[in-house]
Image (cartoon, helix red, strand yellow):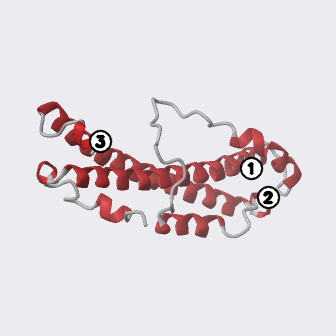
Amino acid sequence: MPADLEQLLAPGYLDGLTDLPLPQLRAMRADCQEVETGLSLLRRVVQGHLDIVGVELARRSGGEDAGDRAELLARLPELLADRTAAPGPGRLTALMAPESLDPGLEAELDQLVGDAFDVSALDGPSLGALAEGLTGLEGTVSQRRRALFERIDALQEEIARRYRSGDANVDTLLS
């Protein structure tokens, strides 16, 4: 079972790093990385929904009527491939598929998009509200990912410091 996001983001989570044993530091880093992988996946899902909503909003602002599902479905591969490479250096995760997603954020996404995500069936105000809700959720997920990256970096820095100072050595990895 992965660690709880709120536990990892709690104030004081990183207190006393220099006093913790190396295996515990590695376990804490692994927990943060696993939860971050889930947030990354959730963020990509939210962005995919936002891309679809954005195209529908643009279509309607161009004077087209709601309800043309066939056109929207035909454009899905193009829409969802638009952000295959994000700006910045990125991070390659050791864990490619998370064990689970944050249940609170996943529930928030489910509440926003419902069981049947059909933007063509929404009226203008509902579509705008959906875009606003998804944008807010994407911001929340991104902020929590940044906070996790700060923790991962702090844990990694403490591990590296121990190797640089001689408090830990590579031979302990092999035993």
SS class, disc 3: helix
What number of labels is visible?
Answer: 3
Quarter of the rendering occupied by the C terminus = top left
Residue type, label 3 = Leu
Q: CA distance from mark 2 to mark 1?
A: 7 Å
Quarter of the rendering occupied by the N terminus = bottom left
Q: Which mark is residue 76?
A: none
Q: Which mark is residue 120?
A: 2
Q: Residue at x 77, y 46 (%)?
A: 76
Q: Nearer the viewer, residue 33 or 132?
A: 33
Q: CA distance from mark 2 to mark 3?
A: 57 Å
Res. 68 in view: no
Res. 40 in view: yes
Mark 3 residue crowding within 10 angstroms, few (<14) / some (14–19) / many (20+): few
SS class, disc 2: helix
145 displayed left or right of 166: right
> Which comes before the other along the chain, label 3 or label 1?
1
> Which comes before the other along the chain, label 2 or label 1?
1
> Which comes before the other along the chain, label 2 or label 3?
2
User: Mark 2 or mark 3, which is nearer to you?
Assistant: 3
Q: Residue at x 47, y 68 (%)?
A: 104
On the image, numbered disc 1 is attached to which residue?
56
Q: Residue 167's x, y, as percent?
A: 12, 39
Q: Nearer the viewer, residue 171 or 116?
A: 171
Q: Nearer the viewer, residue 15 or 21?
A: 21
Q: Residue at x 74, y 62 (%)?
A: 123
Mark 2 residue crowding within 10 angstroms, few (<14) / some (14–19) / many (20+): some
Q: Residue 156's x, y, as percent?
A: 27, 41
